[in-house]
Image: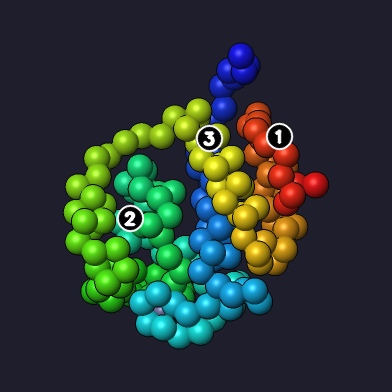
Amino acid sequence: MTKTKFIPIRPLIKLNDDLFSIYIRLRDTDKNGVGYCTTCHTLHSFNFLQCGHYISRDKKSLRYDAKNCHIQCIRCNVFLKGNYPAYSAFMQKVYGNEILNFLNTAKHHKLTSFELIAIFNDTLKKIDLLPNKHLALSRIEKITKKFIELGGNINNKMEILT
Ligand SMILES: [Zn+2]
């Protein structure tokens, strides 16, 4: 039995956002943290890339869905509000219509602190498997420290946290 304790949702979402963004940016870049923007194909480094959501982050059930998120430059993600026509074409090409139907019809779902803690652990595990994780180690440590201070628990011993 694990202890249940009240953990406020908003800071948990913030920490999950930060960690998940690191995951997407590492996943979509090379060993030096360099990658092409999904929607305009310009080359950028880790710090100048963002985690661009195909379906907006407001839809909480898709906020941490790896298929719903890919790297984008700041211009595409912020100024072009996701560069939706190009993003849509990319999604169709990579995942086909099925995933688009799934994402477009996903139900609105409010995440609980229990789910957010599980998502945090899941994201850590995914990062741990990436060959370029060393690029963000100190940030991951900082975020994880805050997560534990907040009352979150880490389920597994991972290379990134040793
Ligand atoms: Zn771009």
Total labels drawn: 3
Location of residue 6 with respect to 113 vertically, above or below: above
Residue at 59%, 40% (x, y): give it: 121
On the image, the x and y values in percent for residue 13 come to: 50, 42
Mark number for residue 71? none
Task: State the residue position of label 1.
Answer: 149
On the image, the x and y values in percent for residue 56 come to: 33, 55
- Whichever of labels 3 and 2 marks the residue nearer the N terminus, that label is 2
Q: Is residue 91 left or right of residue 48?
A: left
Residue 81 visible to an observer of this rendering: no
Quarter holding the N terminus is top right
Q: Please tell me whether mark 2 sits on a helix, a strand or a loop.
A: loop
Q: Please tell me whether mark 1 sits on a helix, a strand or a loop.
A: helix
Q: Is residue 25 left or right of residue 158?
A: left
Give the foreground label among 3 and 2: 3
What's the residue type where badge 3 is placed?
Ala
Comparing 142 with 155, the one in front is 155
Task: State the residue position of label 2.
Answer: 56
**Residues under numbered marks 2 and 1 in contact, where contact means CB atoms less than 8 Å apart:** no
Q: Is residue 1 left or right of residue 63?
A: right
Of the four image quadrants, the one with ligand 1 is bottom left
Task: State the residue position of label 3.
Answer: 118
Image quadrant in which you'd find residue 92: bottom left
- Whichever of labels 3 and 1 marks the residue nearer the N terminus, that label is 3
